[in-house]
Amino acid sequence: MPLLKNGQIIEDTWSNLPESANDDQGGAALDVDLIVSLEQWQSDRDALLKRNGRLGLRLRSDQPPAEIVADLEHFDLIALDFPKFSDGRAYSYARLLRERHGFRGELRAVGNVLRDQLFFMLRCGFDSFEVAGEDSAEAWRGAVAEMSVWYQPTGDGRRPSGVLGGAFGRSRAVAAE
Amino acid sequence: MYRYDEFDHAFVQQRVAQFRGQVERRLAGELSEDEFKPLRLMNGLYLQLHAYMLRVAVPYGTLSSKQMRRLARIARDYDRGYGHFTTRQNIQYNWPKLAEVPDLLAELAEVEMHAIQTSGNCIRNVTADHFAGASADEIEDPRIYAEIIRQWSSLHPEFSFLPRKFKIAVTGAPNDRAAVRFHDIGLQIRRNEAGEVGFEVIVGGGQGRTPVIGVTIRKFLPKAHLLSYLEAILRVYNQLGRRDNLYKARIKILVQQTGAEVFTRLVEEEWDALKNGALTLPAEEIERIETYFAPPAFETLPAVNPAFEARRFEDRDFARWVRSNVSAHKADGYAIASISLKPEGGAPGDATAEQMEVVAELAEIYSFDEILISHEQNLVLPHVKLSDLPAVWDKLVKHELATPNIGLLTDMIACPGLDYCNLANARSIPVAQRISQRFSDLNRQHEIGDLKIKISGCINACGHHHVGHIGILGVDKKGEEFYQITLGGSADENAAVGKIVGPAFSYDDVVDAIDSIVATYLDRRQEDEKFNDTYARIGIAPFKEKLYAAA
């Protein structure tokens, strides 16, 4: 699956620990960057913490990040799953991770990640995206360029238009009258 | 009225360009219908039984004459010469061609209108009291806050893929004309003991398969915190609302299943973390929006106008129209004039292009350029001088817009039903037409008085049958249309869900059944007693007895 970050297709240096792994590290080398499920983290926590490679956590859309807030310092990456594009729970999870719990690592959107959702995801704090299809970099450019106006303040620091835009929104609005 | 700033203009224009690209991809075969569906739905475009249907947002139901004229032109150029005003204060066009929809949207954008968020599982177009800015019982104009919510909810990055659609209504008056207890969130503007103005927050109301009266989760919310509180509610719902079953996905089910107390606690906890942050509304921003809705320059007039009184005395038809269609205005010498879109035998809510233009002209000359749309599918001229009412009425009469039946039996709400909708089990519009023909005697209607009949063609309840004094629900029985009747519902401040009276009636018998219910009411009512009061006093049995006596 192509990985999109900063508008570029990049090589994914992370690997997923297979669910079927029967020993505690699934045979993965100690120094690779490894993404584990919540269940794997909960059952193999100590062994996983002894590794040299970086650690990532993959959460399903029915696994709210509130459950792992105390463990956030151990993860360099959190992958939030969109089982269907219409399952929008991870938008809230992403904002909570970024804006409330101060997660600064990579926040990756995985699953049914479509061109027309990329901009919403970006604004909620995702910074990498597993996008299907060959044209994902082009899709990205389209998705982030189509709209230049938004009304909501989120953790991404972009200033909104309208009533929540403060002096910025007001001065431009007055200028238009 | 609110006017777009440069951002708002850019926002809708970019959205049109984006959708134009998506339609081109669809027409070129690059997108399948499955892939295109969520994209078109986010722009208000449905695929119905016979054709596409475009639902255009009328924010908080307010239009200028210029906007109404544009809606008329669109009806003529892109539809079959008419439009359909809906129970959510929107307008629908039933026959647009897909290839032309981007042009249609571009025409809307020119007059500061769009079709964004009129469908899909997002925060829908916010509705408000249709007497906003005009009624005497108003604490503040609800549209100030509806506009603030419009901005915040437009393409909200976190809340565009909710478990289900989400409807917010705002009223500024204690007499609830916006059905705030039957919305996902209802906001009732209140004054607290200190004299400050804020909101009572009501959550989890709704109709559909499971009618529920909303519960108050906060008695008083200061204005500055409006958006942080809404964001807290939506965030709780987005995370916890059910996504495994379409019919249990509305917030009303979440509130029921978690319990109102626990739900309230979850919202308040989330709000504690959000409040006083970036969503806090600065007082000067509220004031800035308020200036857009400042009252027009009313003249100082006496409360009584002799010319108006004379006409009322001389002309019984005019007097009858005044009695049902004219309401008290907050300014002396002015009145609120409602224009019925429920003529005898018509389809409720339909207006022709010519009629829209007539209303636009009347608003321009007599009502400070303002038109409101009611959730009961009628139009409102909010600020008409008493002395101008005769001229307004004369013009309305010429264009078949003067039906004197606002609030009366034939002022029915009906969904499009099986004539248009692919969810429907039964026809609604023909039932409404037959009832309006049966009760066409206007004197009889006035004698019966206020009576709300509401008709839905399936259990999704788009025709609001649960809250009709008399509700009619179309059901399918072995391939035949049947109609279940409920009594005692109400959408106003005395919110109530109607009760089923007994076995359903066939398409042929349903009008007789309504006649029988009305006869029981007339027979048993005491003096000026309203239908629901008689019903509360005597119960369902007398209605039932007469209805099923022959069977």
Image: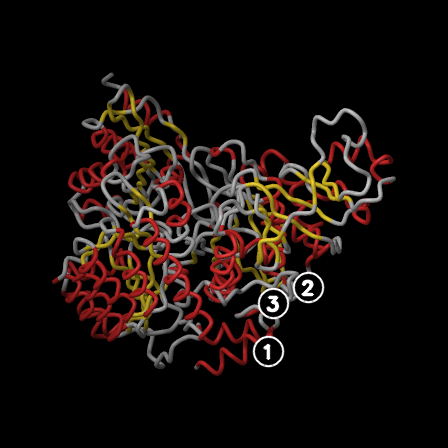
Instruction: Check chain identity for marks 3 and 2: say if they share one.
Output: no
> Which numbered tag is attached to residue A158?
3
Q: As shown in the figure, which amino acid type bears the numbered disc 2?
A: Gly
Q: Nearer the viewer, residue B34 or B268?
A: B34
> Which numbered tag is attached to residue B277?
2
**Res B428 quadrant in image:** top left
Residue B194 x, y percent position in the rendering: 66, 66
Q: Nearer the viewer, residue B515 or B460?
A: B460
Crowd tier of the residue under label 3, counting other residues whose Cα lies within 10 Å: few below 14, some 14–19, many 20 or above: few
Residue A72 x, y percent position in the rendering: 79, 47
Q: As shown in the figure, which amino acid type bears the numbered disc 3?
A: Arg
Q: Nearer the viewer, residue A168 or B335?
A: A168
Q: Chain under label 2?
A: B
Label 1 sits on residue: A167
**Res B287 quadrant in image:** bottom right
Q: Secondary structure at mark 3?
A: loop
- Which circle, 3 or 1, is nearer the viewer? 3
Position of residue B508 in the picture relative to residue A22 (left or right): left
Q: Is residue B265 visible?
A: no
Rounded to the nearest angstrom, the CA distance separating label 3 from label 1 is 14 Å
